[in-house]
Amino acid sequence: MIRHLGPEDIDIFRRIRLEALRREPAAFASSAEDWEALPDAEWRRRLTANAVFVDFHDGEPVAMMGLMRQSASKMAHRATVIMVYVRKERRGAGHATALLDAVVDHARVAGIRLLELALSAENPTALRFYQREGFTEIGRVEAGILHEGREIDDIMMTRRIDHDASIGLPPASDGFTCRDC
């Protein structure tokens, strides 16, 4: 069951976000420490400033994906896929595909035409998933992330969603995490 979280869902958001940051620290630009000290008001602001979707299995949050829209008027047709996480034991069960579908549907309704994302160059599973889902690599940021003293390149990708129906994207499997902003 996928839910678009609202301001009342701060505890669910905090739980799955901190789980993601603790279990997959190399996959995200933020660290658990960055988020652990945030006051409730900031958690609520981040939850409402961006669309955050969580997938549940047996009542437990097991996967998350967010969408951060560009705020400048000439860029408001663009949004970045952020905070992508699927609990390791639930990977391959379709959570990422379902969440991406929910994010794309939400984005289309909001008038977004272009999705963007960044992922670790050390995550080939995520790269294959996004390629199957119609994302195209547009570049790399050398040493985009510094994790425990080690430089990790970011792969930048985009996908137009204002014409997806005409390209007939095939179904894909998941099993990854993605870099957030």
Image (cartoon, helix red, strand yellow):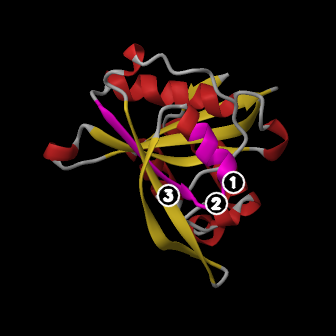
3D distance between C-alphas at marks 1 and 2: 9 Å
- N-term-proximal mark, 3 vs 2: 2
> Mark 3 and mark 1 in contact (Cβ < 8 Å)?
no
Secondary element at image label 1:
helix
In the rendered view of the protein, which quadrant contains the N terminus? top right
Determine whether 140 is above or below 99 in the image. Answer: below
3D distance between C-alphas at marks 1 and 3: 20 Å
Query: Camera-side residue: 118 or 1?
Result: 118
Tell me what residue is drawn at x 50 percent, y 58 percent: 155
**Where does label 1 land, which residue?**
20
Secondary element at image label 2:
helix
Q: Residue 58's image quarter? A: top right
- N-term-proximal mark, 1 vs 2: 1
Amino acid type at image mark 2? Ala
* Residue stretch in magenta: 112-130
- N-term-proximal mark, 1 vs 3: 1
Q: Which mark is residue 155?
A: 3
**Where does label 2 land, which residue?**
27
